[in-house]
Image (spheres, coloured by chain):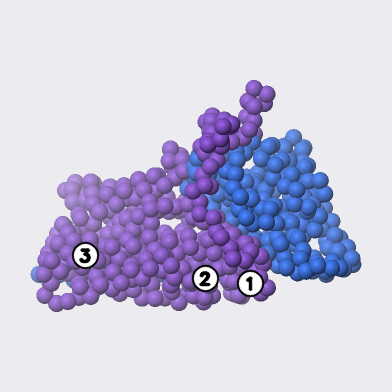
Amino acid sequence: MAASKGFFTDTTLCIGCKACEVACKQWNQLPDDGFLFSGMSYDNTVHLGGSTWRHVAFVERPVPLNTQTDGAFSWLFSSDVCKHCARAGCLESCPTGAIIRTEFGSVYVQPDVCNGCGYCIVSCPFGVINRREEDGRAWKCTLCYDRLRDDLVPACAKACPTESIQFGDLDELRAHAKERVEQLHERGMPEAYLYGASADDQPGTEGLNAFFLLVDKPEVYNLPPDPVAPAKKVKDAWLAAGAAAAGMALAAVGAVFFGGHRA
Amino acid sequence: MSTTVRYKNSVERVYTDGRDIDTEAGDLTGEAADQRASGSTDKHLKEQMQVWRQAPGPRTGDPAYYNVPMLNEPVWEWAIPTYYYVGGLTGAALVLGAASQMGDAGGRKELIRRCHWIGLIGAGISGGLLIYDLGVPSRFFNMLRVFRPTSVMNMGAWILTGAGGTAFLAVVLRGRENRFGAAGEIAGYLAGMFGAGLATYTGVLTANTAVPVWQASRRVLPILFGTSAMSSVGALFELLGGKGEERRLTKIFGTAGQIAEFAASVAMEKQASVVPRVGRPLKKGLSGFVWRAAMTLTAAGLVLGLIPKPTRRRRLAAGIAGTLGSALMRASVEHIGTASARDARASFQQQRAGYGAAEIARQPNQ
């Protein structure tokens, strides 16, 4: 098995050019999603979905950046993508085994197996995967599985002009990301931190194979502050189901006992 | 490959498959090349655009991203909540059938037979509804190519298959004078076990998601679904108008279910509202209205059924109220889930209040 690969998205380097979105659409030959003017800053992509596998968020903040000398406004850009969670909600919930973990550690939906049940959609704590109405199957970022097998870098990382999207072996990416955070702290941005870089950072997903460097709360980028793979809590529900089933059986036997025999 | 027209009303229409790839110059072999295009790129024109008085930038203390939902909402439409109802009815009827088999000297033969038939027909309808809702219905059997305990839906597919299969055997074999009669007897008991699973696993299925209100109610949802399944069996038998022993028996079972369903609904509101924002869809909007309507109907069915000296008309009314209450309850659970998934702040506030992954760390033995 090859070393686990992933993305490190350093949002402080993102300039909001959307080259990643275009490269992704182009390489994967994804159809358009309609041409919509959202009114939300320069973000007309709005959200990740079945045919949108990269999405650049444009955050307009009414506060200056720490390093900013004048003005009470600042931009934050962030290119969002499937996180390829170490513990992936979609993968665990898939009833057909269509969603698999690849040799690169990424999470991949096999389009020839997926039957479009829609369970992965509600199981993803990030709202990444979605079903395409037109063909009924669930789709999401593949970490360019086809390119990786040919030793190529994923299309978005290749196209990124500022190296905001970095691709590589996870160990190296993590080490590099840590250095980058320290560097930013030294340069006067103490708010910089890593989102989902390890299981300690994000126990609910046991770490993300596509992690981020952020400078504001995750909510600002539409990311959950403490996501959890739903199956981590399913034991409670199964216990309740057991109790309900037992109660039902008891009620049925009780009904026969008290309701029967008298004629 | 389908071609669609972009800028329909323009003098210069554009014919495209949504990819703008010249297939004479390049091959469509990309990962998503067989995704079909939308048919129209003008579909957004139908969507109502929000008009803001003030641009929704991140607020201090309560940030969000332009109020865009953080999660993708459930894609399940009417077929899945209907399945929750039919599957529940099927499961609970099979449980009652198995219980009635115990110590039966022949007096409950008709009731047992009815239960097994409800099980068989119900399982058939359930399967149909599930297949209908799939994005690719022809691939239904992919559900049964694996056995995956981590996937509640996969477990459900097996439980439904088991319930349908055993109900079929019970209907066909039970009561025969030959050696197959015993097999039918055993099939009836097995059907009861599968039935108990069928009536409750759907609660687990719903609870095992990232949708904040469903996740918050995970300890109640299976109980709510199970008890609602019991009351729907009681209501159905009121409608069928059984007599004597059958009537008493189903009445006790159904009434117990209705009381427990009402209690579970109250408990669910309490659990979901631990973080107030998460419980909001239960109280406000269309989802809240449907939820209240379901509770009211269940209560009405219960009261109507408990008035002494029942008339035929009153029994019908009780049966209809109970059935509607039970079915509407599943629909409302679906509704509140959708409303909850659309509210990014519900997820954010739930997780900030320590009910994300932090909740697991607080629980010992997990």
Q: Residue furthest front?
A: B11
Q: Mark 3 highlights which residue?
A: B319
| Mark earlier in primary sequence (2, 1) | 1
Residue that label 1 marks: B62
What's the colour of chain A in the image? Answer: blue
**Between tags 1 and 3, which lies in front?**
1
Label 3: few (<14), some (14–19) or many (≥20) C-alpha neighbours in 10 Å:
many
Q: Residue at x 50, y 40 (%)?
A: A134
Label 2: which residue? B278
Amino acid identity at mark 1: Asp
| Most foreground residue, B339 or B148 | B339
Instruction: Report helix, strand or loop for mark 3.
Output: helix
Secondary-structure class at tag 1: loop
**Chain identifier, purple in the render:** B
Marks 2 and 3 in Cβ contact (< 8 Å): no
Residue B138 rendering spot, x and y as whole percentages: 43, 38
Which numbered disc flags the more N-terminal residue, 2 or 3? 2
Q: Position of residue B195 (x, y in %)?
A: 34, 58
